[in-house]
Amino acid sequence: MDYATKELTESLQQIAANEAEQSRESANCAVLGNQGYGAGVLTLPTGVDRFLATRRDFQERTRNVSIGSY
């Protein structure tokens, strides 16, 4: 794993952890039974999803930008 991938992974994990903490603080303390999750219902935290969308948009806008070669 290179440095950039490591930093990105840690940043996305931090975003997810912060959102989880905010959700716990604002959620009622209802006790849920033992649940199973299907792959179709799993989602990314909003902050991570927003980051990935911004990154994807940036890549689309800069796809045809050429800085040349030396």
Image (tube, rainbow, N blue to C red):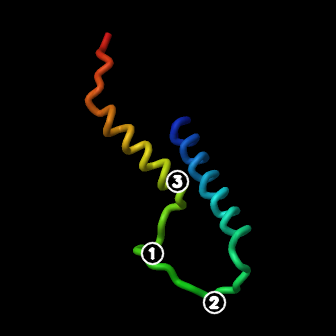
List the residue tagged with mark 1: 41
Q: Is residue 51 above or below residue 70?
A: below
* Left-right relation of 40 to 17: left
Q: Residue at x 33, y 32 (%)?
A: 62
Judged from the image, the secondary structure of the residue bearing numbered disc 3 is: helix
List the residue tagged with mark 3: 48
Give the CA separation, mark 3 to mark 1: 16 Å
Q: Is residue 63 above or below residue 53?
A: above
* Left-right relation of 29 to 8: right
Q: Position of residue 25 (x, y in %)?
A: 73, 68
Q: Is residue 33 above or below residue 27?
A: below
Q: Position of residue 46 (x, y in %)?
A: 53, 59
Q: Position of residue 30 (x, y in %)?
A: 70, 84
Q: Nearer the viewer, residue 1 or 57?
A: 57
* Left-right relation of 19 to 53: right
* Left-right relation of 67 to 17: left
Three-letter amino acid code of the residue under disc 1: Val
Q: Position of residue 34 (x, y in %)?
A: 61, 88
Q: Which mark is residue 33?
A: 2
Q: Nearer the viewer, residue 65 or 3?
A: 65
Identify the image quadrant of the C terminus: top left
10 Å crowding of disc 2: few (<14), some (14-19), many (20+) = few
Marks 1 & 2, CB-CB < 8 Å contact: no
Marked residue nearer the N-terminal end (3 or 2): 2
Q: Nearer the viewer, residue 2 or 52?
A: 52
